[in-house]
Image (spheres, grey):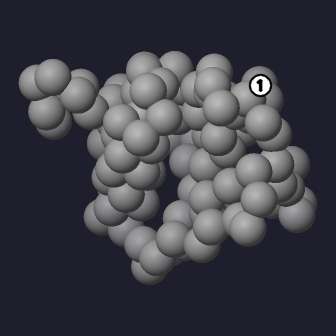
C-alpha cells in the first residue's frame, strides 16, 4: 500500500467530536491504535488536548505527546517508505494555525533536530 502522508488532529474544538483516527496519543503518552486504517491513502494521528499554540507555550505533557507522535511518524515512514515530512492538518482549525509543525519533524538521515 502506498501512503501519501500523515494527517494530524487534536481533540479540541471541532476535532473533539468522535473523529476517526488511526493512532491517538493520550495525555499520559500512551497510544491507542485503531484496528483498521480509516483512510487507505493517509495515516491519521490524533493528539489529546489543545495543540493550537506555539511549542514554547506547551507544558511538558504536550511536548511528550509531540515527541511520541514524531516517533510514530518516523517509524511508520520507515516501514511504509513515506517521507516523514508529508504532514497535513485535518482542517483549517484542526490542529490549529499555531500548531508547532517543526516539532514533529525528525529527519531520518540526521536524526533529531
Q: Horizontal and vertical percent for residue 12? A: 73, 55
Q: Horizontal and vertical percent for residue 18? A: 88, 63
User: Which type of secondary structure does the marked residue at label 1 adopt?
Assistant: loop
Question: Relative to residue 29, is residue 46 depicted above or below?
Answer: above
Mark 1 — residue?
92
Relative to residue 93, is residue 75 drawn left or right?
left
Q: Residue at x 85, y 56 (%)?
A: 19
Q: Horizontal and vertical percent for residue 75? A: 36, 46
Give residue 21's quadrant in the image.
Answer: bottom right
**Relative depth, front residue between 94 and 2:** 2
Question: Relative to residue 3, is residue 103 depicted above or below?
Answer: below
Q: Horizontal and vertical percent for residue 61? A: 37, 68
Question: Relative to residue 26, is residue 10 depicted above or below?
Answer: above
Figure quadrant of the N terminus: top right
**Relative depth, front residue between 99 and 104:** 104
Q: Residue at x 13, y 33 (%)?
A: 111
Give residue 36's quadrant in the image.
Answer: bottom right
**Extreme residue in the front direction:** 1
Relative to residue 34, is residue 20 drawn left or right?
right
Q: Mark 1 packing: few (<14 Cα in 10 Å), some, or many (20+)?
A: few
Whether residue 10 is visible to the viewer of this picture, yes or no, is no
**Extreme residue in the left direction:** 110
Q: Residue at x 60, y 72 (%)?
A: 32
Q: Residue at x 41, y 41 (%)?
A: 79
Amino acid at each position: 500500500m502506498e501512503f501519501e502522508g500523515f494527517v494530524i488532529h487534536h481533540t479540541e474544538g471541532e476535532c473533539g467530536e468522535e473523529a476517526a483516527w488511526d493512532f491517538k496519543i493520550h495525555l499520559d503518552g500512551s497510544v491507542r491504535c485503531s484496528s483498521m486504517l480509516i483512510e487507505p491513502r493517509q495515516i491519521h494521528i490524533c493528539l489529546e488536548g489543545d495543540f493550537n499554540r506555539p511549542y514554547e507555550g506547551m507544558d511538558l505533557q504536550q511536548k511528550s505527546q509531540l515527541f511520541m507522535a514524531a516517533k510514530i511518524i518516523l517509524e511508520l515512514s520507515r516501514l511504509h517508505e513515506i517521507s516523514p515530512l508529508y504532514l497535513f492538518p485535518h482542517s483549517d482549525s484542526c490542529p490549529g494555525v499555531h500548531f508547532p509543525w517543526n516539532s514533529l519533524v525528525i529527519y531520518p538521515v540526521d536524526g533529531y533536530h
